[in-house]
Image (tube, grey):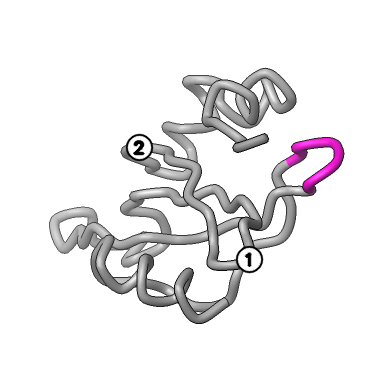
Amino acid sequence: MTTTIADVKSANPKWFTRDNKRFFNDVSYHVLHSQSKKAYLVRATYAWTDMFNPRNRRLHYRINEIDQTTLEVGSLIDDEFKNIDTVKDWLREN
């Protein structure tokens, strides 16, 4: 079975609230799969780029692990990605 964004949203209703999205400056959410078929939450975000100067916002991507059994959003991957292509490269390697 392939995990979808609807599956993840259903398992994590508080994660995807409007307030949470606004707090983290997230723009969009996607579920993408690695070569090993593991699902990850990919977030396009302006979060934490420069909290003190909102005019210097820079869109980037972050990846969270998804528990393959419960579909709960898990820990954040340390890497920050500058575009969706670099995310897809990372997923191919992992």
* Residue 49 as seen in the image, left or right of residue 76: left
* Residue 69 as seen in the image, left or right of residue 55: right
Q: Is residue 70 above or below residue 38?
A: above
The residue at 65%/57% (across/down) is 38
Please state the horizontal and vertical placement of residue 21, each as a whole percent of the image. 46, 32
Please state the horizontal and vertical placement of residue 46, each as a whole percent of the image. 31, 53
What predominant SS class does the magenta segment belong to?
Answer: loop
Evaluate if marks 1 and 2 touch, with contact meaning CB atoms under 8 Å apart: no
Q: Which residue is disc 2 drawn over?
A: 28
Q: CA distance from mark 1 to mark 2?
A: 24 Å
Task: Return the residue nearer the eye: 74 or 88.
Answer: 88
Q: Kindly indicate the quadrant of the structure image that contains residue 1.
A: top right
Q: Kindly indicate the quadrant of the structure image that contains residue 82.
A: bottom left
Q: Which residue is disc 1 drawn over?
A: 36
- For residue 81: magenta? no
Please state the horizontal and vertical placement of residue 7, each as a whole percent of the image. 64, 24
Q: Is residue 36 above or below residue 27?
A: below
Q: Residues within 10 Å of mark 1 (few under 14, many from 20)?
A: few
Residue sitting at the far left: 55
Mark 2 lies on a secondary structure that is: strand
Question: Mark 1 or mark 2, which has the lower sequence index?
Answer: 2
